[in-house]
Image (cartoon, coloured by chain):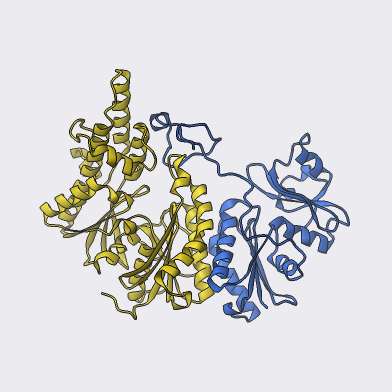
Chain colours: A yellow, B blue
Amino acid sequence: MSVADDPLILGIETSCDETGVGLVRGTTLLANAVASSVDEHARFGGVVPEVASRAHLQAITPTLRRALDEAGVRLTDVDAVAVTAGPGLAGALMVGVSAAKALAVAIDKPLYGVNHLVGHVAAEQLENGRLTEPVVALLVSGGHTEILEVTDIATAAELLGQTLDDAAGEAFDKVARLLDLPYPGGPHIQRAAATGDPTAIRFPRGLTSQRDMERHRYNFSFSGLKTAVARWVESAQRDGAPVPVDDVAAAFQESVADVLTRKAVLACQERGITTMVLAGGVAANARIRDLTRERCAAAGIALRQPRLSLCTDNGAMIAALGAAVVERGLPPSSIDFGADSSLPVTEVLVR
Amino acid sequence: MLLLALDTATPAVTVALHDGARVVAESTTVDARRHTELLIPAVLDALAEAGADRRDVTEIAVGVGPGPFTGLRVGLAAATTWGAALDLPVRGVCSLDVIAYEVVRSGSAGAQPFAVATDARRREVYWATYDAAGQRTDGPHVGPPLTPDEHVGTMLAALPAAGAGARLYPAAFAQVVEPEYPSAAVLATAVAASAVEIVEPQPLYLRRPDVTVTTGRKSVLGSASTGSASTGSAQSGRRQR
C-alpha cells in the first residue's frame, strides 16, 4: 500500500464522452470526478465527436474543482499532472491536453501524456493494489475491444488483438436499437437478457473458425454478429411472429461474452500469463463478468477487476498510470506533445 | 500587472504578454493543425522573452472566436484552466473585434465603416461589420460570402474587409485590407486599454454540431456508419427527444 508521502498525481481524461479528473497517491484513490455527456448523445444513438468536445470544454474546470474538493487537497499539493494523450477522439483529446498543459505550467509541475488503454489497466491498481506483471488485459467499452499484454505498467504494453470493426459496446448499442431498446444499449440488453434463453438462438461467434483462428487469433469482429441479429429479427417480423426480445438479447449477449472470454483466456494460456485484468465500460455487463470469472477460475487464472466507476473512462485511471510512471522516475513528456487519436498501446508515455 | 493574451480562433496561434504599459513579448505562428502542440510552448517562450515567471501572470485575455471548433477550444481550454487553477480573471473577447481594433489603429481601411471576415470553412465566413471608430454594428455571423442577393453578400460587398475570409473571397468585398489574423499583442493592448467589449470566456461557435439523428432499425443494415453520427442534416427519428 502507498504511504502519505507518495507523490500526489492529478489525472485528466477526455478521450471520448466522459470528462474525468482524478487524484491519486501511489495506488490510493483520493478523488474520481466524472462529468458525462452521454445523455446528449442518446438521441443520436452514438457518441457525436463535436458534441463530446463541446461538453468537455464546458465541464473541464468544474470537474477539476470537484475532484480537488472530493480529495480535500489544493492544487499547490499536486506533484505532477497526467493526461490522456490518446487514443481517442481527436477533438475531445485536445481539450484535455490543452487544459492539462495550461494547468501544469500554471502550477509549475511536470506533465505526463499517457496512454488511455494502459490507463484502464492501471485503474486496477487503485482497487486491489499493485499488479504483478505480466498481465493480460481485456478491455471492452463503447470505443475499444482489445487484448493487451502488459509486462510493465509504466513502460511496456503490447497489443495482442483488437476488434476489426465494431467495438463490443457499439455492438450492444446497435442491437439495442434493433430491438427498440434505448441508448446506451448495454444495460438494456442485459435487463432484457435476464429473462431470455441464451440458447434459444445460436448467433455466430466472430473470428473463431479454424481459419480465422490462424489469422486473427486474438482479434474480434462484431459486425457480422450484429448483421446476423438484424437478419434474424427482420425474418421473424416478415413471418409476422412477435420478436422474442429477451431471447434475442440473451443469445446476442452470450455470443459476445463467449468470444471475448474465450480469446482472452486463450491469450493467457498461450502466453503463460496467470493474471487477467478485465476493464472498460462493457465490463459492467454481468454475463461478461460471470463468464470471465468462471473461465479464469477453470484455467487457473487470477482475475482482477476494478469497481465499475474505475472501469468506465475516468481521470483516476490516468492519475494511476501517471503515478506508476512518476514512481519509475521517467522523464515528463515534452511540452509540445499533441493529442494522438491513434496512439499505439506500446507508447505508454509520450515523449 | 502581467496580462497573458492568447487567441486560437484562426490558423494563427498567437500569444502576448502586457505589463500594463506595453506589450513585453509576443509571437504568432500560423499552422492550422498544430494549435495543441504550439500554444503552451509559445506562452513559455513569451515568458522567457519578457524575463517573467509564470507565477507573475495576473490576468488572462482570450479570443472566444468565432472560429473552427477544434482550434478555438485549445485556447479556451488553456485560458480557463489556467485561470481556474490560480484564481485569475479570464476575459473573453470576440476574435473579430481584435482584428477590427487593429484595423482602426492602423488606419488600414481609412476612416470609414468596414467588415471583418475570417474563414469558417465550407465556403463560408464568420463576419461582422464595424463603424469607422471600430464599434461593431452587426454580427458576428456565419454565412456564405458570395451571394449578392442575400443580406450578407450585399452589405459586405460595399465594405473594405480585413481577415483571412476577405483574402479567400476578395470578390465579395470592396477591398481587402490588413490584418489577416487576430494578434494577441493587439488583444492585450485593447484589453489593457479597456477598449473592447469583454465577454465570458465561452466559445462562439455560431453553428450547431452536424449530426444525423438515427432512425432506428434502418441504420443498422442500411448505412455504413452508425457508431458515430455522420455529417448531414438532422432527420426526425424515433429516438429524438
Choose top left, top right, bottom left or bottom right for residue B238.
Answer: top left
User: Viewed as shown, does residue B123 lie left or right of A79?
Assistant: right
The image shows residue A229, relative to residue A288, as above or below, that is: above
The image shows residue B136, relative to residue B238, as above or below, that is: below
Judged from this view, the residue extending furthest toward the right is: B111
Q: Position of residue B59 (x, y in %)?
A: 64, 72
Q: Is residue A351 visible?
A: no
Q: Residue at x 72, y 55 (%)?
A: B96
* Observer-nearest of A259 and B168: A259
* Observer-nearest of A86 and A126: A126
Q: Is residue A160 visible?
A: yes
Q: Position of residue A220 (x, y in %)?
A: 28, 44
User: Viewed as shown, does residue A10 lie left or right of B206?
Assistant: left
Quarter of the image with the N terminus of chain B is bottom right
The image shows residue A250, relative to residue B142, as above or below, that is: above
User: Viewed as shown, does residue B202 lie left or right of B129?
Assistant: left
Q: Position of residue A232 (x, y in %)?
A: 28, 27
Q: Residue at x 48, y 61 (%)?
A: A96
Q: Position of residue A156 (x, y in %)?
A: 30, 65
Judged from this view, the residue extending furthest toward the top is: A239
Q: How many marks?
A: 0
